[in-house]
Image (cartoon, helix red, strand yellow):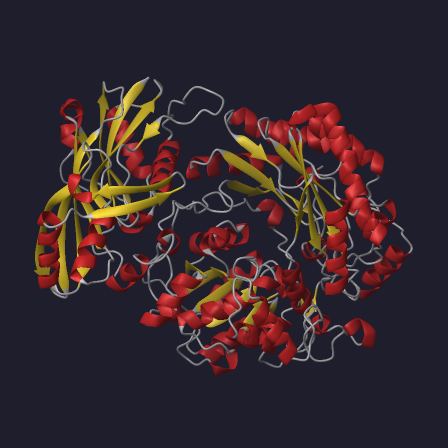
Amino acid sequence: MRTWLVSFARRGPARYLSHLDTLRAVQRTFARAGVELELSQGMRPKPRLSLPLPLPVGAAADDELALARVTDAAPSARDGLLALQAASPGGLDVIALRESPLRARPQPLRARYACEVRGDAGAVAAAVGAFEEGEPPRVVRRGPKGTKTVDLRRSAGAVSCRATPGGAHLEFEVRYDAGTAARPQEVIEVIADKAGIEPVLHRLRRVEVVFAEAARAQHAPTQRSATT
Amino acid sequence: MLDSSTASRHVFQEDWPPDELEDLLARVVRPGRYVGGEFNLRRKPGIRPRIVLSYPDAYEVGISNPGLQILYELVNDRTPAAAERAYCPLPDMADLMRARGVRLWSLESAEPVAACDLWGFTLPHELACTNVLEMLDLAGVPLHAAERGEGDPIVMGGGPAVADPWPLAAFFDAFFIGEVEGRMAAIVEALGAQTRAERLANLAAVPGVWLPHAAQAGPVERQVFTDFACTPPVERPLVPLVEAVHDRVVIEVMRGCTAGCRFCQAGIWYRPVRERPVDMVVAAAERALAATGYDEVSLVSLSSCDYSGIDEAVRRIRALRPGIRVSLPSLRIDSAATSLAGLAAEQRGSVTLAPEAATQELRERLNKRVDEAQFDEAVRAVFSGGFTGLKLYFMIGLPGESDDDVVGIAAMAAAAARRAKEIARGRARLSVSVSSYVPKPHTPFELEPFAGEATLRRRQALLREAMPRHVRLSLHHLESSLVEATLARGGPGADRLVEDAWRRGARFDSWTEHFDEAAWRGAAAAAGLALGDPAGEGAPWGETGSMAPWHAIVDARVTPAFLEEERRRAAERATTADCRDGVCVSCGVCGAGVEMEVLA
């Protein structure tokens, strides 16, 4: 069994896929490329493929990571890359591939997001300040197991804001090693609420993902701008 | 680390989609259904004629329709035209589009549908009618063909629902009657003319085309694709990236069915039987699996167990790709069929059998040549073969049906449940699905009365009461059946009812959660109808003895004498043999180059 770390970009129509849709599209790309994935054990075997950090629906990304366990019959990394590139749908662009000794799924440490919001840039800037320094911004999540209050500031911060025509460009960081992580939409909703603007994300993009130290050494080369 | 700088595929830039679409997509549920991007998508920018193909339902339903996949591949890969697609936006998206003045766009180019040369709709059933109006309106195309001008696309309808085009006649410039594959090149060529009037005149000369707003003599003969058996099935289908209703390779092994069920419109509409060679089926399955990445192949037709090469095709596909599941959508009621299903999908948990009616007398009226012993044998085979679930499909409201026939459904389910308990012990699940029968044009029952709301409601209650508690009963939404009955045999003027219902808010009528009963009842009342009565001037046709209006437009190739004889035989409980078995039933379809083609 071999492990491939596949770096890919998500753009265009693929931005609007859910995490499961994205996983299925990557899996079908492997099947179309003729690269056989290892199957898990048990009653209902599943291909051993994971995307360590789900992307929100609507988010573009330049450099995402997929970890795939391929069979020994899989081609070389060079041939595998070409086959995956030819087999992937438009918008899901395979950038790079390397064989890795990794066995466990890499743990994300932090990610940086960027988006545009529409409205008064001055009000957005003031709301960003309040997000970072005022009352702790909290959101309540409701699920089948009950409700949960999440303090967004524990995991989200380093928010920057600059004025754009008709609105503002925001960038912020979410940490994944500090308990329950904030969702990008939640960060924007809190800021929009304080700024009195509509909480709609435009051109949401995950700019960068940093993985835990042990893993980072293994796939640092994938964490750079796309070349396609 | 290996990099690539030689991407030959379409690369999307950061500014895709355009701002106005991005703004909508950020606000709707499941935006992935509005953006395309599928595997095997074709892009032919700048090519004319530009044809937009539509299935008037949500993306998840439309992308699963094999007919649209056939047309998409045919137009893009075998004609100089470009085919793009559009589906019906759900109400959340439709509301936003109207509020912001955004027009319906195609998934391939994100360009307005209204700017295409031909807008072709696959019309699957009557409950999609209001969605056609919704799409025309969202595209900014005038609803009525009579109001369209030089800059508007030609709107053309095809598919099984054009067996009676009257309920949509006002909204279409043209209809294609029958199977279009053999005429697509001529249609594309017809679009090359300079003016709209010339293009319509050219289309009128294509066999199978009916222009509702032009004087055309006599009924239009239903077109049969006579090269079906020597034309490979779709081998590079679109593969959706968001979850769809059906997510698998579809290989059409056979077209047509001659079992002769008297209620079945498809059994008439797709005659005669034509079978594809097994070698072609297996090769197509192999290529389609490679092109899609799917792990399941469905060998489809109206009755795949009747395909002469079914056993060989299933065995060869499984031998070629051992991990692949091969499924069959419909099974005959006999043990051989269930054994075949076991071979096709060893891990499949359930199987569906369709007795249609519970008593021998009623089955004979329908020409379902199945008796209780065969049914029992099939149920035994299902559970002995390792299946743990069995679904039985029935109809109520059939011609000649009594309350006893309906209670018989519960008795039949109880017998199957006993057999299941005996063989499969506690693991067996049994469910019964019951829909309401709606008489359809061009069938032997086309002039039979619809059972009506009160009768169907009472019989549904009877079923609920009689059905054993441990059998899961699923009853089809009654109000939808009433609308279906009103439109299925609509005559001239039925289109006014459709438009009125749409203006009152009706759309997505086949979705229980979107069905607007008040809109339909209001529109029917305004037209002086009770929901369930046929719409249109001169209805009901059976009582007046006048010629049914669909026969004035559509010649389905079966003779009136055949339909009348079959209706008479139904009343006498006389069954009619399958013409595949060597006895011609003189239905009138074969001749003039149209023949049954079965494998030797």
Q: Is residue B271 in view from this perspective?
A: no
| Residue sitting at the far front | A135
Give above or below for B552 relative to A101: below
What residue sits 14% from the left and 29% below the top?
A220
Percent of width and height locating residue B282: 56, 34
Residue B28: quadrant of the picture: bottom left
B132 with respect to A66 (left or right): right
Residue B1: quadrant of the picture: top left
Give above or below for A181 relative to B25: above
Q: Is residue A213 in view from this perspective?
A: yes
Percent of width and height locating residue B149: 44, 81
Instruction: Say which of B553 and B74 sits in front.
Output: B553
Q: Quadrant of the N terminus of chain A?
A: top left
What residue sits 78% from the left and 59% below the top?
B588
Q: Quadrant of the C terminus of chain A?
A: top left
A199 with respect to B254 (left or right): left
Residue B179: quadrant of the picture: bottom right
Give above or below for A43 relative to A25: above
What residue sits 77% from the left and 43% below the top?
B410
B11 with respect to B273 (left or right): left
* Callout count: 0
Instruction: Say which of B521 and A9 sits in front.
Output: B521
Percent of width and height locating residue B342: 64, 28
Give above or below for B24 relative to B36: below
Percent of width and height locating residue B134: 47, 69
